[in-house]
Amino acid sequence: MPKILDRMSAHQMVISPVVGMIICCLSAVAVGAQSTISSYSPATNKTFPTQLLWGDTHLHTNLSVDAASGGNSRFGPNEAYRLARGETIIAHNGMPVRLNRPLDFLVAADHAETMGLFPGLASADPRLLETETGQRWYQMYLSGPEEIAKILIEFGNSLRSREDLLDSPEYRKSVWQRVTSTADAYNQPGQFTAFIGYEWSSGRGGGNMHRIVIFADDAERANQVVPLSAYDDNRPRGLWRYLDQYERLTGGQALAIPHNSNVSAGLIFAETDSDGNAMTKEYAQSRNRWEPLMEVTQFKGDSETHPFVSPDDEFADYESWDRYRGFSTDPHEDSMFAGEYARPALRRGLALFTKVGANPFKFGMIGSTDSHTGIPSADENNFWGKFSWHEPSATRAVEPFVNIPNIVQLEWEMAASGYAAVWAQENTRESIFAALKRKETYASTGPRMSVRLFAGWDFVAADLARPDWIEYGYQQGVPMGGDLLALASGAYRKAPSFLISALKDPMGANLDRVQMVKGWIDDQGETHEKVFDIALSDDRAVSSSTGKVTKLRSTVNIAEASYTNSVGAPILQTAWRDSDFDPSEPAFYYVRVIEIETPRWPAYDAKFFGTKMPPEVRMTTQERAYTSPVWYTPE
């Protein structure tokens, strides 16, 4: 298994007898010194991750042009970090807002393209007004909503033409320094982690190709560069080159996370490179190096899988947001689905590995919000809208998501999702970033359920009864995000076994079931998938005739926006072995945990405001978590 580095390893000390006596007499000097002898404290020898940390790696503030134009006039990075830490702030609708529970980490990831435009216009920033476009936009800003709308039209056209109309390096640098210094100011090692980051917003090919960029470092390093925007280079290869140059220049670290693959027009997980050329080993390796994760669930829909590509999966159609090709009015085509969702992408990755010798889609999974309100809340009963103009109100659920002509996408179709879960040693930039890179992460649509996954060759059910079963899992196997090494040639044939534990959110719903999702490629080069129900609540079993499981009764009272935990289970654990395993076939495995049915956010709106929703509005949900996969590659 991959070795987890021990950051607290002791250093040997050679001390003379005289000095030794002095130290014994002045015992206070020795307080906190690490000993080379064994300790009564067992924790001194444990280095595996024990902390489950929750965060949002994709939050927009009023520094993003679309967020500010969408009603967010006041919530900048300061307000975002304050909310993430658990403070209460007055929202634009006059209501106080606070997260149900604070987060452990946050990335204020504003769009690089003309970052800080509207706050700069509002304050008449002199660096912005030095430019001809800045002066003109300032006068338009002062003229009111109609002229402001024209600014947005010009900005949108500039993104399509890749012409930076503002073109002010000094202003761009000043905004970035504000971003980095604010993150440093709120970063409190051991208590709350504020990462420096931004969003690279390419629309290359007509689909959403956006990535979140996260730096592991402080402002001193991050200020040696400015964000690469889609104006500078709109190809993923250009972004990877920028990240490589950053690491070489500063000695720091960075990574990128694709998101909203569900509206990428089939391009994010294409079998070719971004220029439409055949995938090469070098390209696949670069993608694997710089993009170890994907954001699989967020406000604009869920991207785990879709009924078109997973027709036998009864839970596939979850928060689907798939009617349009990206954000254009062109209709979506069925051929795009395979390049838009995580599960078919993981299958494609296996096939590409056999063709080019590297897997470009060997990613772990996280969730995040993509909120443009500056409010990082993914709870159904605390949903504050995609944009600030859709903060809670009696009518927001049936209002358009954005005012784009010919696109009828209503706010109720937004998903109150999701969060990134990370298994780390401590709440610091260093430890969380390391967990992100090694993919020891999982995605939640909002609930903070605790999920563990270990893969090995010899795990059995009795191992879960061990008080140290988690430590045993690291010793005898690999965690989520890892590679299960093939057994040596000549070893007796056996199938991989897995230890899985899922514990409900202590403030949330019981669990319905735990599933194992397997994908593999056969000797003919064809990829396959199968979903196994491996742990079920309420003494249910898989039917031998249908292969299905009886559905739990719903306890939801829609009128009261309530439910009970009279069904389901607070914890589901199992040891599972793949009885269909073929050691010659590359495969991946990930766990999906599904809650019992609960009210969806429009039900909470209807209850609070005393309104009635149209019949087409979805009022219930079954929230879930997706672990990062474990991969198996034949020897």
Image (tube, grey):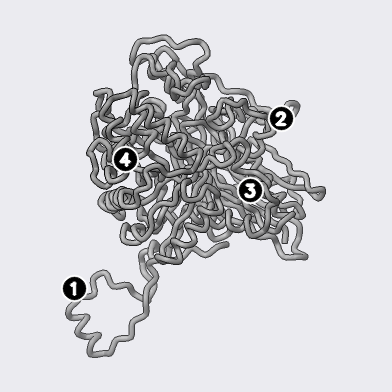
Left or right of 550 in this view: 212 = left
Q: Which mark is residue 28?
A: 1
Residue 194 seen from this side: no
Which kind of residue does numbered mark 4 sit on?
Gly
Residues at marks 3 and 1, CA–CA distance in whole angstroms: 65 Å
Residues at marks 3 and 2, CA–CA distance in whole angstroms: 43 Å
Marks 3,1: beta carbons within 8 A: no
Quarter of the N terminus within the rendering: bottom right
Q: Which residue is mark 2?
A: 547
Counting from the top left corner in percent of width and height, residue 11 is at 37, 77
Q: Of residues 420 and 414, which is closer to you in this image?
A: 414
Label whose residue precedes the other's in the sequence (1 or 4): 1
Q: Is residue 538 above or below residue 266?
A: above
Which kind of residue does numbered mark 1 sit on?
Ala
Q: Which residue is mark 3?
A: 275
Left or right of 562 in this view: 620 = right
Residue drawn at point x = 70 percent, y = 30 percent: 312
Label whose residue precedes the other's in the sequence (3 or 2): 3
Residue drawn at point x = 35 percent, y = 52 percent: 169
Q: Secondary structure at mark 4?
A: helix
Label whose residue precedes the other's in the sequence (1 or 2): 1
Q: Secondary structure at mark 2?
A: loop
Label whose residue precedes the other's in the sequence (3 or 1): 1
